[in-house]
Image (cartoon, grey):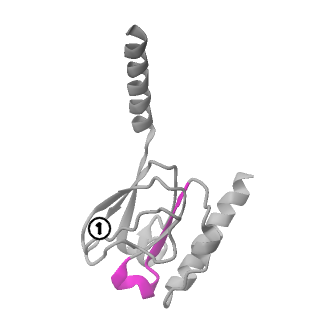
Amino acid sequence: MRKVIVLGALVAALGFAGAATAAEVEVKMLNKGTEGVMVFEPALVKINPGDTVKFVASDKGHNVETVDGMLPEGGQKFVGKINEEVAITFDKPGVYGYKCKPHYGMGMVGMIVVGEPTNADQAKAATHPGKAKQAFANLFDKLAATKTAAK
């Protein structure tokens, strides 16, 4: 009986330790930021599975939602309302592309990389309107640069 209690306490402690190490990253939805107009800041976020990204409507008129074709297998789609703060916890490793629906064509997009970018090739193949195409190309270049720097 004592072993069961000790084992239960150990499992509970590990569970709390795992929760304590999870991080929360804030991404602002902005009309104007350091990278230009109609941007998410930061636009590229690298996190671990179990971490949370909180999208903050710093400026009015924006939302956040996933981009079709830019989710890892089993990754959860999300859609926020205009001017709504949204917090998403990411459990599946891979690349998640997201956009502000009203400003998608203006290039208001971003990317979250959870753990290893296992679906990067699939995500790169997604098509985008207007300036979003170049914005995602720039984000994939930044991701490649961080991987090279880490080696």
Q: Quadrant of residue 11?
A: top left
Q: Is residue 96 left or right of residue 6?
A: right
Is residue 20 in view from this perspective? yes
- The residue positioned farthest toward the right in the image shown: 151
Q: Position of residue 69 (x, y in %)?
A: 51, 76
Residue in front for this viewpoint, 70 or 100? 70
> Would you place residue 151 above or below residue 101 in this image?
above
Q: Is residue 138 visible?
A: no
Q: Position of residue 53 (x, y in %)?
A: 40, 56
Of residues 79 and 39, which is closer to you in this image? 79
Report the front residue among 144 and 19.
Answer: 19
Q: Residue furthest top?
A: 2
Q: How many marks?
A: 1
Question: Depth check: 16 or 136 in front?
Answer: 16
Q: Say which amino acid is labelled 1.
A: Ala
Give the farthest residue toward the bottom: 130
Q: Mark 1 falls on what kind of element?
A: loop
Q: Which residue is mark 1?
A: 57
Where is residue 136? Give x, y as percent.
Answer: 55, 77
Q: Is residue 4 left or right of residue 81?
A: right
Label 1: few (<14), some (14–19) or many (≥20) C-alpha neighbours in 10 Å: many
Where residue 123 sits, quadrant-wise, is bottom right
At horizontal 60% and vertical 74% (from top left) the residue drawn is 122
Q: Quadrant of the N terminus?
A: top left
- Tell me the magenta residue range: 100-114
**Residue at 43% from the left image edge and 45% from the top image edge:** 23
Residue drawn 49% across the image and 73% down it: 35
Asked where in the image residue 149 lies, by quadrant, the reply is bottom right
User: Percent x, y for residue 48?
Assistant: 52, 49
- The answer to whether residue 59 is magenta is no
Residue 102: in magenta span: yes
